Image (spheres, rainbow, N blue to C red):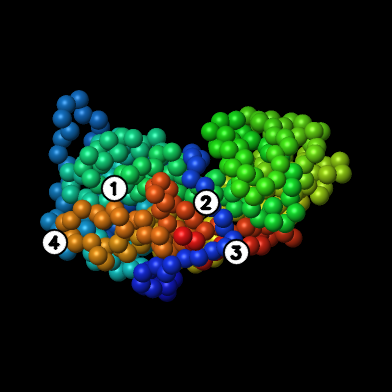
């Protein structure tokens, strides 16, 4: 893994990226936020925030050493409840980044948001942290920002909800709208003209619908029909049947995970409609069930490249004895980002926020990314296809960005 880090982190300043194949990245609202946690590791500390106070907040119960050579960076994550397993994976990844880089100039301290995100942020600020990695849940961002914003401490959230981005909060998660846009661009260039969609009720479905509309506006094509359904039950089957009966399309976007998408695909491709092109979203990434379902043969979806993730996962498993959750790379890349910027960041000074807007971007396990002025991370995505029991890249992720 250290060879991979050297390739990513040790290559110096990110080169100026260009790409003719990605088009404009969308900066719309993302899907529901993701979860994370942490464990105690070398050069890191774990601090549990107290329950919300009834009066003024109490001082931090953990006295951190005086730092004259290390930047203090806070990791704000839930460490208990239903988030624990995913959280542990992300926290382990931040640990791995420190160890792989032999980092001596960062002190990473974890603060538990499960008992109050605002209190965790308040304690992190009181302890002298100049940068926050987190929170993980979009719902926690307002509480964190209400504390970190006035203190001038930026937060790099791992949520994929673009609506929480601001001048003080940067969103690093994988934005679903970017996946839809990339897939539609590819499909339009490969014969798709008339589109339909299966959309779950709620926020994710609405964002997928808007992303589809915007993408067709950018690249051409017609939206001829769509059906909505209640997520979490078999109503997607009925919606797929209704959509098939309406007809008039050659391509269907299914805005859901692998299990429900496979159910819908069986209906969409029945009764002589086997040539219908199917498009999934980033929710399909890492889903091996797709390779065992004939109904989705030939289907497309877009996501960040897994080329470096495989090596990352092997190294993670060797070190921690378990496979990482796919989201763990966000924690790893956030630490690499902090280390890159730390090259020109004086200990004790405020974090140089302007460096996050570097148009050349940054390189991590998930490939190149950069922050737009909106505060949302723009990512280079590859187009994948389900093919002959495997998932293969049919249009590589660009190695860079156009400016």
- In this image, 169 relative to 256: left or right? left
Q: Could you say where residue 139 lies in the image, as x and y percent from the top left?
A: 39, 35
Q: Secondary structure at mark 3?
A: loop
Q: Quadrant of residue 393?
A: bottom right
Residue receiving disc 2: 25
Q: Residue at 60% x, 30% y: name it.
A: 201
Identify the element where label 1 is drawn.
loop
Residue lying farthest to the right in this orientation: 272
- Secondary element at image label 4: loop
Q: What is the spatial separation of the Cα atoms under label 3 and label 1, in whole angstroms?
A: 33 Å
The residue lying at 49 percent from left, 61 percent from top is 401
- Whether label 2 touches label 3, CB < 8 Å: no
Label disc, if present, on residue 396 of the rendered structure:
3
Tell which circle, 2 or 1, labels the residue nearer the N-terminal end.
2
Q: Nearer the viewer, mark 2 or mark 4?
A: 2
State the residue at coordinates (33%, 44%). Answer: 167
Image height check: is 48 above or below 41? above
Mark 4 = which residue? 68
What is the spatial separation of the Cα atoms under label 2 and label 1, in whole angstroms?
23 Å
Disc 2 vs disc 4: Cβ atoms closer than 8 Å?
A: no
Front residue of 150 and 347: 150
| Crowding near the residue tagged with mark 1, few <14, some 14–19, many ≥20 C-alpha atoms within 10 Å | many
Residue at 37% x, 59% y: name it.
358
Crowd around label 3: few <14 · some 14–19 · many ≥20 (10 Å): some
Give the quarter of the figure containing the N terminus: bottom left
Kindly report the distance in space between the C-alpha atoms of the residues bearing marks 2 and 4.
Answer: 40 Å
The residue carrying mark 1 is: 154
Q: Nearer the viewer, mark 2 or mark 3?
A: 2
């Amino acid at each position: 893994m250290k060879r991979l880090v050297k390739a990513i982190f040790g290559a110096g300043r990110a080169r100026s990226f260009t790409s003719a194949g990605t088009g404009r990245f969308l900066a719309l609202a993302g899907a529901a936020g993701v979860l994370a946690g942490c464990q105690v590791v070398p050069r890191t500390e774990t601090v549990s925030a107290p329950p919300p106070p009834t009066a003024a907040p109490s001082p931090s119960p953990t006295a951190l050493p005086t730092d004259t050579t290390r930047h203090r960076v806070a990791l704000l994550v839930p460490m208990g409840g239903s988030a624990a397993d995913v959280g542990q994976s992300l926290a382990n990844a931040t640990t791995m980044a420190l160890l792989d880089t032999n980092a001596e100039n960062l002190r990473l301290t974890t603060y538990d948001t499960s008992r109050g995100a605002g209190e965790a942020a308040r304690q992190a600020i009181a302890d002298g942290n100049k940068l926050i990695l987190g929170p993980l849940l979009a719902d926690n961002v307002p509480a964190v920002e209400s504390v970190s914003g006035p203190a001038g401490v930026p937060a790099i959230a791992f949520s994929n909800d673009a609506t929480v981005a601001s001048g003080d909060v940067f969103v690093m998660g994988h934005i679903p709208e970017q996946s839809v846009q990339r897939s539609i661009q590819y499909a339009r260039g490969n014969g798709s003209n008339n589109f339909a969609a299966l959309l779950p009720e709620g926020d994710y479905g609405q964002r997928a619908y808007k992303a589809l509309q915007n993408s067709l506006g950018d690249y051409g094509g017609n939206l001829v029909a769509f059906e909505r359904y209640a997520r979490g039950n078999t109503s997607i089957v009925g919606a797929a049947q209704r959509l098939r009966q309406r007809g008039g399309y050659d391509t269907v976007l299914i805005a859901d995970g692998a299990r429900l998408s496979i159910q819908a695909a069986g209906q969409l491709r029945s009764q002589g409609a086997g040539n219908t092109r199917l498009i999934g979203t980033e929710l399909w990434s890492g889903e091996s069930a797709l390779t065992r379902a004939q109904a989705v043969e030939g289907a497309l979806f877009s996501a960040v490249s897994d080329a470096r993730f495989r090596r990352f996962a092997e190294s993670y498993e060797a070190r921690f004895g378990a496979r990482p959750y796919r989201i763990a790379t966000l924690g790893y890349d956030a630490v690499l980002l902090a280390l890159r910027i730390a090259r020109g960041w004086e200990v004790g000074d405020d974090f140089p926020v302007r460096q996050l807007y570097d148009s050349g971007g940054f390189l991590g396990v998930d490939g190149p990314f950069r922050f737009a002025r909106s505060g949302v991370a723009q990512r280079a995505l590859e187009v994948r296809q389900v093919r002959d029991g495997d998932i293969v890249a049919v249009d590589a992720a660009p190695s860079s960005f156009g400016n």
